[in-house]
């Protein structure tokens, strides 16, 4: 008894059309093209609403500066300067900080600065003292902190 060939089995199963072979190459494309979209739907965007314009340069920093000023704590202003020392808003933050002559309450400083509260409080103490020795002491205790560069500006 003879077993049917693979091609005969595939033909019987309907996997191959008669007259084709598995290695006959790629199937020919459908002779009729896909239906064309109507002109009014072809130019319609995929989104129903337009994308918002990109934020202007400095917008996130300006918003952060406004929030630091609104919070009303030295710590918030000092943190802004640690994060954005060269930003255009840094000048007004420095001016607002220079006008403050009392330190933050420790609880308020912790709420604003979190884990950085100790370093921020030391920077604020050096700022309020205002002597070169106070600034040098801060810089020697925190040589790699971003506020060390800010301390150099305040000397």
Image (tube, grey):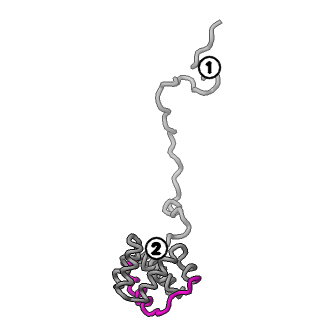
Question: Which residue is located at x 62 percent, y 20 percent?
Answer: 9
From the viewer's perspective, is 73 left or right of 93?
A: right
Which residue is rendered at x = 38% and y = 86% of the image? 91
Image quadrant where one finds the C terminus: bottom left
Q: Is residue 35 shown above or below 147?
A: above
Query: Eyeballing the image, is 94 above or below 18?
Result: below
Q: Nearer the viewer, residue 104 or 139?
A: 139
Near-viewer residue (97 or 2): 97
Q: Of callouts 2 and 1, which one flags the residue occurring earlier in the amino acid sequence? A: 1
Q: Position of residue 148 (x, y in %)?
A: 38, 76
14 to the left or right of 45: right
Q: Which residues are magenta?
A: 84-107
Residue 135 is one of the magenta-drawn residues:
no
- The residue at the point 48 percent across, 24 percent down is 23
Residue 140 tag number? none
Total number of numbered labels? 2
Q: Position of residue 36 (x, y in %)?
A: 51, 53
Q: Is residue 141 above or below residue 130?
A: above
User: Badge 1: few (under 14), some or many (20 or more) residues near its Cα, within 10 Å?
Assistant: few
* Residue picked out by circle 2: 53
The label on residue 9 is 1
Where residue 139 appears, x then y in whole percent? 38, 76
State the SS at label 1.
helix
Residue 56, visible in the rendered structure: no
- Determine the secondary structure under disc 2: loop
Q: Residue at x 44, y 78 (%)?
A: 61
Q: CA distance from mark 2 to mark 1?
A: 62 Å
Report the front residue among 38 and 47: 47
Image quadrant in which you'd find residue 13: top right
């Amino acid at each position: 008894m003879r077993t049917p060939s693979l091609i005969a089995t595939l033909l019987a199963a309907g996997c191959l059309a008669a007259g084709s072979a598995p290695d006959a190459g790629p199937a020919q494309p459908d002779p009729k093209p896909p239906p064309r979209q109507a002109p009014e739907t072809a130019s319609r965007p995929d989104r129903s609403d337009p994308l918002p314009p990109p934020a202007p340069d400095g917008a996130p920093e300006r918003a952060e500066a406004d929030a630091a000023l609104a919070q009303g704590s030295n710590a918030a202003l000092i943190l802004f300067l640690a994060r954005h020392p060269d930003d255009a808003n840094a000048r007004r933050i420095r001016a607002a900080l220079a006008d403050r002559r009392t330190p933050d309450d420790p609880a308020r400083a912790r709420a604003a600065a979190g884990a950085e509260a100790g370093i921020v409080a030391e920077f604020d103490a050096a700022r309020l003292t205002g002597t070169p020795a106070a600034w040098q002491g801060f810089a020697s205790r925190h040589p790699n902190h971003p506020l060390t560069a800010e301390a150099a500006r305040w000397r």
